[in-house]
Amino acid sequence: MTQPNKASQLNDEIDAIQVDGDQADVAHFQWRISKNLTRRIDQYLVDRVGYLSRNSVQRVIDNGLVKVNGRVVKASYRPRENDMVEMVAPPQPVNEIAPEPIPLDIIFEDEHLIALNKQADLIIHPARGRWSGTLVNGLVHYGNKWSTINGNWRPGILHRLDRNTTGIMLVAKSDEAHWRVARQFEERTIKKTYMAVCHGVPELLSDVIDMPIGKDRYIREKQAVRKESSGGKPAVTVYEVQKIFNAPDQLRLTNSQHAHDQKNPAPAQRFCLVKLSPKTGRTHQLRVHMSYKGFPLVGDTIYGGRVFELADFRFERQALHAYEISFTHPITNQTLTLQAPLPPDMQQLIDRLPVASP
């Protein structure tokens, strides 16, 4: 399956390096400059890495991924003799998406679209050098009739879930179905419901979190609550506590190995099962909002959660599942409400939590 626009693809990969820096497969380059140069560093790098356009190189530089002698530089910098230039960039793209027999849990399917229950540890589409083991590789193996609106390297993809978030996703088979459903996402008429297990119990068992979200100022792969004047975009989440739990005996809560995660405060020793309804679709929205309120998701170490460990059980991904979606069928105009049952690991987590007395 040929990729039609490599420049656009590489730009997407550069953005992905910022969003998921801890998971990115990237190319590392290093050069020692032998003499003073009259050319700018962006021109120098275009000559050194032939598959990157000048615009792509400038985006890499703007994102702080080019250093000279250990310091971030601007595109206008002119390299000098003995400078050590280092660059982190997307790897050279491949030309085809290989079909792979990745299991697909199909919940609904007709000639226009499918709804599937995505498993954990599954990236949606190839990017950042990961050209295999993605949902798209599985879709290409499953069939060859997918919408082309997002390009051939993201066939049918209407929306995304984080790598370790499970649950229901829609995939379009035709361009018409794609743009009709995409319009519903754009107009926010699609209703999505998630289930999450959080540390702690909110004082208000039901509430609206209306806080803008933008990129974290210090850590590239994170999002954070930020004022709109500082780059945040409106974000609204409705939460409803479903059950409250005590901590089981002999529970161990361990933190991430990443240094920046060690700064997160210790979470509460109680837990709750929460229904989350996002009214907007910002990156990591539910994880950021619940963490901001002081109730991070179990296993979500990047946003203050902890790995959950018992003698016979370990849970180390964010306990977040896209449980239900309600939308208008793009062709028949019928309202469809589809559900994806909780994955076994998340159900086992809930089963091991003692229900708190009223």
Image: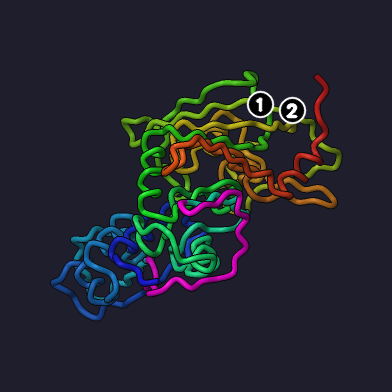
Secondary structure under the numbered disc 1 in the rendered image: strand
Magenta residues (range): 90-112
- Name the residue type under label 1: Val
Task: Inspect the magenta stretch and tell me whether residue 106 lies in it.
Answer: yes
Marks 2 & 1, CB-CB < 8 Å contact: yes
Disc 2: which residue: 244
Q: Nearer the viewer, residue 15 or 6?
A: 6
Give the CA separation, mark 2 to mark 1: 8 Å
Residue 17 visible from this viewpoint: no
**In the picture, which quadrant includes the N terminus?**
bottom left
Residue 253 on image: x %, y %? 73, 44
Reply above or below: 223 against 268: below
> Residue at horizontal 37%, vertical 66%?
89
Task: Count numbered badges in the picture.
Answer: 2
The kind of residue on which mark 2 rests is Ile
Q: Label 1 neighbourhood size at 10 Å, few (<14), some (14-19), many (20+)?
A: many
Outermost residue toward the front in this view: 332
